[in-house]
């Protein structure tokens, strides 16, 4: 028995330490924030009397839907006149299942912390396809990332989504030689991820593109069959939900979220910036136009109204599409460099309302920019600290692309998936909505790419200053052996 345990420890001690570290960090933070919320009355929503770990309208909405499912047996928000079409089903089902057994939110968060620990192991395994050092580095970044830690202890979709997303890619990489294990199962799990958070819809084309670019199969048939099997697995999960929306709302859309974000935020914020009015005033103008063309005479966030919302958005944006493009690009900068620490501090009432740095950049308001960066006390310190870390990670990602050709086929595949996942998500979640939370869902891929890029940079400096051989031979003998063993296990 002792020999068996020793063998297991010797083989999996790295995974165990990564899992344990991730679990303990989040458990300690959950305990500290729970105590802080109870003793200070902070971390609560302004909408109802909701307190941590239920924070904000999204968090409260998931809990409300789960409770309604348990009470009424239907997927709808309390008091709504029609079925739910803003949320997708997996996370509310997860909440409802756990609440049916435990009745409270504590068990939900403990399960999410457990799942985050498993996700950190998956980050390590995927990063180790490039090298053991990259696997360790990316897992450590995931373990201590403040935004990942905080949101994994709240009622939000990101923790479950990240796990399914990483699991789908791990299955794809680990069992690719088997159509049914590797390709079909990866498609099924990615379908589950998409019904947890619809931004995963960008991954199927990324899988296909990566497959075409990194595989050297000799015939079209050998390339086509895995893609067909993968797509079948994906649509096996997603299609019933699409069909449900077609029957109920006469649309093949997954959710109303994307259209509502454009109608409520992207387009009105651009209009407000153009006409020097407030966001609220711009939304009132959009709402008036919607009521003119919408036969339902409401602006509820449902698929029933999204065709008319899209029409309103199109009417306003077509007046200056190039102007909006510039606005969107500048507003996307926070996707890569936003700190997220100020958002956590604001929720804890350690800092007040945070001014929008993107607005200051757009208006070339240098005094305001100086005030935000250097004269806002605690807020400035959090901004510089957090953003500095993410500038470092973004630079690592950029450097990693320079080292793409140095990698073998499997390592190229995981790097390409990571880079494309980041940039495709940036395209759909960028603009005025860019924030640390929107970045969180694909942050593991940023960590993998950044760890590789920073590793390359370290080896470049080592070669430059020690006058030794330069890249690509960057693995020493010990690390090559670790990588050889790791490749067998992954």
Image (tube, rainbow, N blue to C red):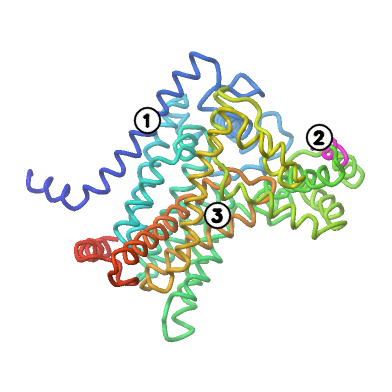
Q: Which is more toward the observer, 32 or 245?
A: 32
Q: Whole-Å distance between the Cαs marked 2 and 1?
A: 39 Å
Residue picked out by circle 3: 200
Label 2 crowd (10 A; few <14 / some 14-19 / many >=20): few
User: What residue range appears in magenta?
Assistant: 278-285
Label 1 crowd (10 A; few <14 / some 14-19 / many >=20): some
Give the mark nearest the N terminus, 2 or 3.
3
Give the mark nearest the N terminus, 1 or 3.
1
Residue 71 seen in the figure? no
Secondary structure at badge 2 equals: helix
**Residue 280, which numbered label?**
2
* Left or right of 409 in this view: 327: right
Mark 2 touching mark 3, by CB under 8 A? no
Residue picked out by circle 1: 27
The residue sitting at the right extreme is 292
> Would you place residue 228 above or below residue 435 in this image?
below
Of labels 1 and 3, the one closer to you: 1
């Amino acid at each position: 028995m002792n020999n068996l345990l020793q063998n297991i420890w010797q083989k999996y001690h790295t995974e165990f330490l990564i899992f344990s570290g991730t679990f303990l960090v989040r458990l300690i933070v959950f305990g500290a924030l729970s105590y802080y919320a109870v003793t200070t009355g902070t971390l609560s929503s302004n909408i109802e009397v909701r307190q941590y770990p239920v924070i904000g309208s999204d968090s409260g909405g998931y809990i409300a839907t789960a409770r309604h499912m348990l009470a009424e047996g239907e997927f709808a928000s309390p008091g709504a006149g029609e079925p739910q079409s803003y949320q997708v089903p997996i996370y509310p089902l997860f909440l409802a299942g756990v609440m049916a057994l435990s009745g409270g939110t504590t068990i939900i968060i403990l399960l999410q912390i457990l799942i985050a620990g498993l996700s950190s192991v998956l980050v390590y395994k995927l990063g180790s396809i490039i090298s053991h050092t990259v696997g360790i580095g990316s897992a450590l970044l995931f373990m201590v990332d403040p935004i990942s830690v905080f949101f994994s202890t709240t009622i939000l979709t990101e923790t479950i989504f990240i796990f399914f997303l990483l699991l789908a890619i791990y299955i794809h990489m680990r069992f690719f030689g088997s159509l049914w294990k590797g390709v079909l199962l990866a498609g099924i799990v990615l379908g589950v991820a998409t019904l947890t958070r619809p931004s995963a819809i960008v991954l199927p084309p990324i899988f296909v593109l990566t497959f075409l670019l990194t595989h050297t199969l000799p015939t079209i048939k050998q390339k086509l069959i895995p893609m067909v099997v993968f797509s079948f697995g994906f649509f096996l999960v997603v299609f019933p939900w699409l069909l449900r929306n077609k029957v109920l709302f006469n649309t093949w859309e997954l959710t109303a979220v994307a259209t509502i974000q454009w109608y409520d935020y992207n387009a009105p914020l651009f209009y407000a910036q153009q006409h020097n009015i407030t966001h609220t005033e711009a939304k009132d103008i959009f709402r008036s136009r919607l009521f003119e063309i919408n036969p339902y005479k409401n602006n509820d966030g449902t698929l029933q109204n999204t065709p008319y919302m899209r029409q309103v958005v199109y009417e306003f944006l077509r007046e200056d599409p190039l102007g909006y493009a510039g606005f969107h690009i500048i507003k996307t900068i926070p996707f890569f460099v936003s700190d997220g620490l100020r958002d956590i501090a604001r929720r804890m009432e350690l800092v007040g309302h945070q001014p929008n740095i993107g607005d200051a950049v757009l208006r070339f308001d240098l005094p305001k920019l100086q005030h935000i960066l250097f004269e806002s006390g605690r807020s400035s310190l959090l901004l510089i600290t957090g953003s500095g870390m993410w500038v470092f990670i973004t630079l690592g990602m950029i450097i990693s692309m320079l080292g793409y050709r140095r990698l073998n086929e499997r390592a190229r595949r995981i790097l390409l998936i990571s880079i494309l996942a980041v940039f495709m998500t940036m395209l759909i979640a960028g603009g005025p909505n860019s924030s640390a939370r929107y970045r969180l869902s694909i942050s593991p891929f940023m960590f993998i790419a950044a760890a590789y890029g920073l590793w390359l940079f370290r080896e470049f400096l080592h070669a430059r200053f020690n006058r030794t051989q330069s890249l690509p031979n960057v693995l020493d003998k010990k690390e090559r052996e670790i990588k050889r063993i790791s490749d067998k296990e992954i």
